[in-house]
Image: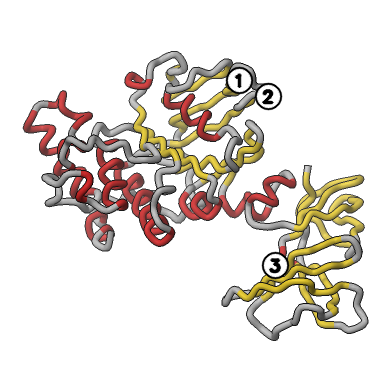
Amino acid sequence: MTDLPRILNFRMPAEATPAGFRQQPARVLLEVDRLTRRFEGAAEAAVSRVGFSVGEGEFVALLGPSGCGKTTTLRMIAGFEPPDAGSVRLRGADITALPPERRGIGFVFQDNALFPNLTVAGNVGFGVRRLGRAAADRRVAEMLDLVGLSGLGGRMPHELSGGQQQRVALARTLAPAPPLVLLDEPFSNLDAALRAETRQDVRKLLKAAGSAAILVTHDQEEALGTADRVGVMHEGRLEQIGAPDELYHNPVSAFVASFIGRSNILAGTANGMDAETPFGRLPLSRAANGAVRLAVRPEQILLDPDPTAEAVVIGREFRGHDQLFWVQEGGRCLLVISGPGPQVSVGARVRLRICDCVVPLS
């Protein structure tokens, strides 16, 4: 969408800071309180006591592997799935028992779900027909302009590219001006290059429209690069929610540390703000005591060639901007990321040093 900056130039709200860097806390729009859902015959709950809030105009992502409960959580917020316990409140009103069509929430499906027998304009105007013909036509034109598809209202969905169809689905969802839009892995059917472009377009469009959003995805790059805050889900539970940089630098569990980027998990004994580890005494990012697990990011480990050292490079992957090494030391296999500098060959002996604070995990 090459003309998007021009289209949005006069619409962009003051709160348009990069993902994860919101300066002022938003007024609460949505409150999800201890949502729980157990399917018949299942040993464990699909979703267990999940709770979080979304501010007005905020973009939140629910991130996790397949089967972690993120889509079920989204469907309970939308009203497509009844919770066994917990509640959903929108602007202070309890909407837990309301059907989807009475919640005033927009939903963008994974497959777009466009009506194949309606034109682009017919799809976009489907939810605003109650406004009357003239008002609905104005709203459709405004939405097509917003998503950069002016002039294409007479086309049929099959005549559009995948990215254009995605924008039509978003325009249809935004036309009734919902305060909240739910996105269920909407970019998964697009190729990699188009997916990266489209998700940034969608973020800008939602910000321009003033709608808050919850995105469900298993793609960490998508979540970290798009959302103001990210909630990481695992086995039906919300393990941690926070700004992308907070999750990366201060994970609370081994799962979050390993799912958000890559981490080496080491054992240690903490005493306040430092810990004894296989690499000697290391500073901690937060206080801890007793036996702990420690998250060490691959880029925190320095690798120095030393023919007398115990550690051996057993694998190497050159990635242009950096190099990824697999290093065997004793019974451990560690991941190390270094810059594109001098090559260290597979089979070389190296000495390892940790150059930063490490994170104690719960």
Q: CA distance from mark 3 to mark 1?
A: 40 Å
Instruction: Using the image as rendered, state which of residue 282 and residue 335 is in the foreground.
Output: 335
Point out the tag, 3 or 2, that comes first from the N-terminus.
2
Compared across the picture, whether 100 is left or right of 353 comes to left
Q: Using the rendered view, name the quadrant where residue 329 is placed.
A: bottom right
> Residue 151: percent from the left, percent from the top?
12, 51
Question: Which residue position is annotated with label 1?
Answer: 38
Q: Amino acid at mark 3?
A: Glu
- Disc 1 secondary structure class: loop
> Crowding at label 3, few (<14), some or many (≥20) Cα neighbours within 10 Å?
some
Question: Which residue position is annotated with label 2?
Answer: 44
- Disc 3 secondary structure class: helix
Which quadrant: the C terminus?
Answer: top right
Q: CA distance from mark 3 to mark 2?
A: 37 Å
Q: Amino acid at mark 2?
A: Glu
Residue at left 48%, top 35%?
54
The nearer-to-camera label among 3 and 1 is 1
| Dots 2, 1 in contact, CB < 8 A | yes
Q: Using the rendered view, name the quadrant where residue 8 is placed.
A: bottom left
Compared to residue 87, the image places residue 296 above or below, namely below
> Crowding at label 1, few (<14), some or many (≥20) Cα neighbours within 10 Å?
some
Q: CA distance from mark 2 to mark 1?
A: 7 Å
Question: Which residue position is annotated with label 3?
Answer: 299
Point out the tag, 3 or 1, that comes first from the N-terminus.
1
Identify the coloring.
Answer: secondary structure
